[in-house]
């Protein structure tokens, strides 16, 4: 689906029982006439009696086009509405999306933001058990559900990933029983174990993420190698949170020591780095978290990938030499 289909769906909902389905261009024109340049014969008193249309745009990251006209129109209509009243609420997976938008579009956004925290492991476990039909313990081992919850929490906090992980694990287990690779003990029934979830997790994340890393640009490679190098230096810590400022310092150090023009020319600003981090976060390679300290304005960076995994992803690519230099394990001989 195209981002422009949002015009089509919105007008279809507004047209009531008619459910008028138009092309994207025609729907946009209808919306412009309805909220923008429609009849202006309403006094303030009359307008206050008009019903309010509340539009909730979920995952508006996908509505960001090159010219950003779609989001601009949606957030501009409430300000220009004369014959109708409109409230637009946008939900984004990118914590700094407003700062990445054009100044023209930013001028149309409201100043209020609400940050939603990711589900905790315990909350994810409870949701998974609720969504499983019947008694969850009859289908999944307790450890299997907990592993799926922790893995999801470490990677993105997106509950849909946990559902998909459990689905893949259940399919793997069913295939094993059907093919005879696993036998049912007499008096028991098929069950999804933690090993099934671990295998499903690897199938879901490892191959896709490693492929995405191997195709990264020179600047993205600098960022990921810097993350791996900083994480390698903090070995022993369960959860490593990296600061944006130390990231910039490390990137500059790696670029200056590379001896290659494509890295030496990288003079990333704070905005450049935040943009790259957001793209990598959208790809599931890393996670941006909101600091608990109110005086800390920038997100913290976390990733479940180990330095050796990043290094392995860059093997047989144009960035292998740089990755090997900073991420390879030291050998004594």
Image (cartoon, grey):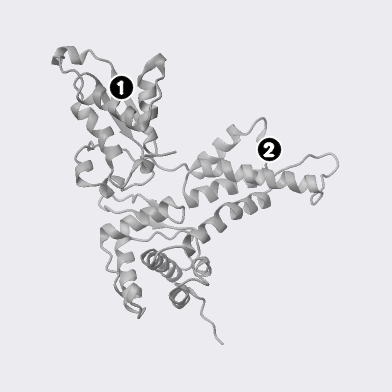
From the viewer's perspective, is the residue at label 1 or at label 2 nearer?
1
Q: In the rendering, at what x and y percent does residue 106 appear?
A: 22, 42
Which secondary structure, mark 2?
Answer: helix
Q: Nearer the viewer, residue 200 or 188?
A: 200
| Mark 1 vs 2, N-terminal side | 1
Q: Which residue is mark 1?
A: 53
Quarter-wise, where is residue 51 in the image? top left
Along the viewing direction, whichever of 199 and 321 lies nearer the viewer: 321
Label 1: how many Cα within 10 Å (few below 14, some 14–19, many 20+): few
Q: Are marks 1 and 2 in contact (CB under 8 Å)?
A: no
Label drawn at residue 243: none
Please tell me which residue is depicted at 53% across the width and 44% down the height of the picture: 161
Residue 110 falls left or right of residue 164: left
Location of the C terminus by quadrant is bottom right
Task: Give the distance between the C-alpha atoms of the residues marked 1 and 2, in whole angstroms.
Answer: 44 Å
Q: Residue at x 26, y 60 (%)?
A: 270
Asked if 59 appears above or below 307 in the picture, the reply is above
Query: Farthest residue in the right direction?
Result: 186
Residue pictured at 35% horizontal, 24% vertical: 11
Disc 2: which residue: 137
As displayed, is residue 36 above or below residue 265? above
- Residue 233: name its quadrant: bottom left
Find residue 332 and report its horizontal and vertical position in percent.
Answer: 54, 85
Q: Residue at x 21, y 24 (%)?
A: 81
Above or below, 328 relative to 110: below
Q: Is residue 131 above or below residue 308?
A: above
Query: Residue 32: which quarter of the image?
Result: top left
Q: Nearer the viewer, residue 6 or 23?
A: 23
Crowdedness of circle 2 by 10 Å Cα count: few (<14), some, many (20+)? few
Quadrant position of the N terminus in the picture = top left
Query: Whole-percent x and y of residue 236?
Result: 49, 66
Q: Secondary structure at mark 1?
A: strand
């Amino acid at each position: 689906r195209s981002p422009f289909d949002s015009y089509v769906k919105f007008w279809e909902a507004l047209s009531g029982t008619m459910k008028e389905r138009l092309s994207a261009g025609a729907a946009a024109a209808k919306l412009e006439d309805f909220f923008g340049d429609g009849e202006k014969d309403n006094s303030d008193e009359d307008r206050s009696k008009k019903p309010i249309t509340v539009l909730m745009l979920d995952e508006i990251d996908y509505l960001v086009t090159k010219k950003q006209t779609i989001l601009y129109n949606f957030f501009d209509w409430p300000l220009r509405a004369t014959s109708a009243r409109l409230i637009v609420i946008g939900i984004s997976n990118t914590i700094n999306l407003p700062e990445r938008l054009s100044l023209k579009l930013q001028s149309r956004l409201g100043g209020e933001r609400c940050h939603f925290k990711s589900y905790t492991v315990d909350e994810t476990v409870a949701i998974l058990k609720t969504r499983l039909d019947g008694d969850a313990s009859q289908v999944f081992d307790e450890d299997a559900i907990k592993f799926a919850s922790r893995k999801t929490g470490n990677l993105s906090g997106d509950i849909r990933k946990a559902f998909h992980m459990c689905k893949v694990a259940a399919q793997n287990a069913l295939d094993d029983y059907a093919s005879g690779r696993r036998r049912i003990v007499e008096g028991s029934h098929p069950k999804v174990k933690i090993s099934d979830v671990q295998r499903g997790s690897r199938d879901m994340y490892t191959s896709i993420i490693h492929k995405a890393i191997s195709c990264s640009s020179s600047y993205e490679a600098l960022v990921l190698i810097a993350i791996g190098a900083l994480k390698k230096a903090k070995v022993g810590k369960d959860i490593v949170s990296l600061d944006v400022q130390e990231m910039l310092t490390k990137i500059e150090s790696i670029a200056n020591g590379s001896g290659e023009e494509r890295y030496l020319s990288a003079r990333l600003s704070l905005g450049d780095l935040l943009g790259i981090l957001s793209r990598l976060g959208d790809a599931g390679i890393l996670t941006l978290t909101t600091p608990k300290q109110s005086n800390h304005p920038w997100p913290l960076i976390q990733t479940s990938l180990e330095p050796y995994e990043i290094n392995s992803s860059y093997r047989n690519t144009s960035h292998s030499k740089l990755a090997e230099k900073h991420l390879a394990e030291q050998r004594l001989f």
